Image (tube, rainbow, N blue to C red):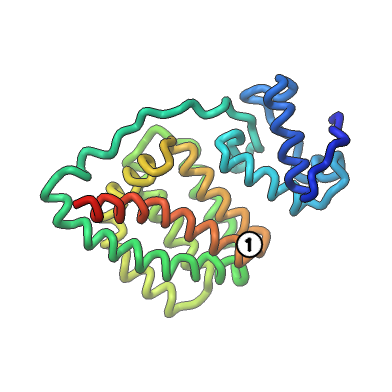
Amino acid sequence: MEISPNRPLKSYEWVMNDIKRKMEDGSLAPGDRLSSVADLAASYGVGQSTIREALSALRAMGRLNIRQGSGTYVTAPPEPASITAPSFLYDEAWMDRAQTLRHILEVRKVLETGCAALAARNRTEADLAALASILQSMNERLGDEAFSEQADIRFHQELAKATHNPVLLEMMESLSSKLHESMKDTRALWFYAERSTAERLLDEHQGIYEAIVGRQPAEASQLMEAHISKVESVLLGKLASG
């Protein structure tokens, strides 16, 4: 790989900008698979954590898709989306349940950010295998929304198991029925907030998983908080507007 000599101050930024430049000039086309993290680190002369940070930033821009067990692929630049708010946001019957959903999201943010951090510290190889299996099934069945809802719930529950804290797991399991009841609305709100697709949602789960793999509690917690906050912000905005 030919490396650009122009380096911004932060290592991950110049790596990110160089990869992005290659996307823009056609050196990397949509569908191309990137080299492994180890190979990229060797090519750029930086640590693997720097490469992961650069790839995470590009993934957040919608320029990369990480497929569990397959690799990291270049995606086409995201097009401006004309996504309107889910119709249920204007349904009076749904509005009666909106406060309950808001409370569920508040509890999830408190519990699941902690779960993500603890899982990053305490996870075992068996835990990682279970989480990876769920992500793989989500990737294989991206177009099956009913399946994806259930897999989404399983991912969050499996993450709680990876904390190896029985009290925390019990608290998460007590939310199971409420998670099932609210997940359809939660996912629809996420798609609206993100102006994006199921593939992008999978990328967010993948990012949380990678932080857990790398034993990075702070990053895992921050990614989880951002994941839940997107939904919460749309809901709070709608509640405020009445």
> Image quarter for residue 223?
bottom right
- The residue that appears at 45% across and 78% down in the rendered structure is 166
Residue 2 x/y as whole percent: 86, 29
- Outermost residue toward the top in this view: 26
- The residue that appears at 33% across and 46% down in the rendered structure is 189
Residue 101 x/y as whole percent: 26, 59
- Outermost residue toward the left in this view: 93
> In which quadrant will I find the N terminus?
top right
Question: Pointer 1: residues within 10 angstroms few (<14), some, or many (20+)?
Answer: few
SS at circle 1? helix
Residue 48 x/y as whole percent: 78, 51
Number of numbered callouts drawn: 1
> Image quarter for residue 117?
bottom right
Vertical position of residue 25 compared to residue 201: above or below:
above
Left or right, 83 with reference to 132: left
- The residue that appears at 42% across and 62% down in the rendered structure is 157
Q: Nearer the viewer, residue 117 or 11?
A: 11
- Outermost residue toward the front in this view: 241
Residue 146 x/y as whole percent: 32, 41
Q: Which of 121 and 229 is in front in this view?
A: 229
Given the image, on which type of amino acid does mark 1 rest? Glu
- The residue that appears at 68% across and 24% down in the rendered structure is 24
Left or right, 74 with reference to 2: left
Q: In the rendered image, which residue does mark 1 sit on?
A: 125
Q: Which of 81 and 198 is in front in this view?
A: 81
Q: Which of 94 and 81 is in front in this view?
A: 81
